[in-house]
Amino acid sequence: MIIIGIDPGTATTGFGILRKNGDNLRVVDYGCINTKPNFSDGERLKIINKEIDKLIKKYKPKIFAVENLYFFKNFKTAIPVSQAKGVILLAAAKRRIPVLEFTPLQMKMAITGYGKADKKQVQKMVRKLLDLEEKPKDKDKRKDDATDALGVALCCAILGNKNKTKLS
């Protein structure tokens, strides 16, 4: 079964794709969808939706796992992230792909066993649990969005059955 994990954002949307076969997990692909700051909000959302559609067509996922943020430190980022999440949910809904949403706390707890783990601890455990040689990086080498997306997909693989979703 293919799980697509998504870390939504308008400037950068991270994605991580896992194949789950029983207890075996393998990274299939990961990366980021980047949009240009000079594009309008509508253009950015259109790009994100188009790229998510491409991922769906290429990998044929059985489930989407999306990071769900209940609390924003900066209200100005809350609306654009919510808009990006909306076009991602729309892409999944058009193909009738179930979506599970996980908070950062749930992801950290599932991956590290500690809900207040810092970013480096989460990255280390994602690398270890998915048997990756190094931390996943976007092309510009600064973004952690791909790692976060793999973390959300990994959280889904770990917690999916507890959320009454059969993952096998």
Image (cartoon, grey):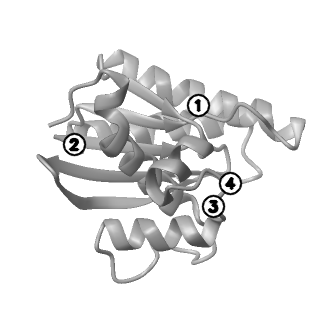
Q: Is residue 52 visible?
A: yes
Q: CA distance from mark 2 to mark 3?
A: 27 Å
Sequence-wise first label, 4 or 1 = 4
**Label 3: which secondary element:** loop
Sequence-wise first label, 3 or 1 = 1
Q: Residues within 10 Å of mark 4 (few under 14, many from 20)?
A: few
Q: Which residue is mark 1?
A: 85
Residue 72 percent location from the top left of the image: 81, 38
Which labelled disc corresponds to residue 73? none
Residue 131 percent location from the top left of the image: 28, 73
Front label number (4 vs 1)? 1
Residue 14 percent location from the top left of the image: 51, 53
User: What is the tally of numbered marks visible in this picture?
Assistant: 4
Sequence-wise first label, 2 or 3 = 2
Residue at position x 75%, y 53% in the image: 37
Sequence-wise first label, 3 or 4 = 4
Give left or right: position of 161 versus 126.
Answer: left
Question: Amino acid type of disc 4?
Answer: Lys
Q: Residues within 10 Å of mark 1 (few under 14, many from 20)?
A: many
Q: Is residue 137 visible?
A: no
Sequence-wise first label, 2 or 1 = 2
Q: Which residue is mark 3?
A: 117
Residue at position x 34%, y 29% in the image: 162
Front label number (2 vs 4)? 2
Q: Which residue is mark 2?
A: 2
Q: Which residue is mark 4?
A: 36
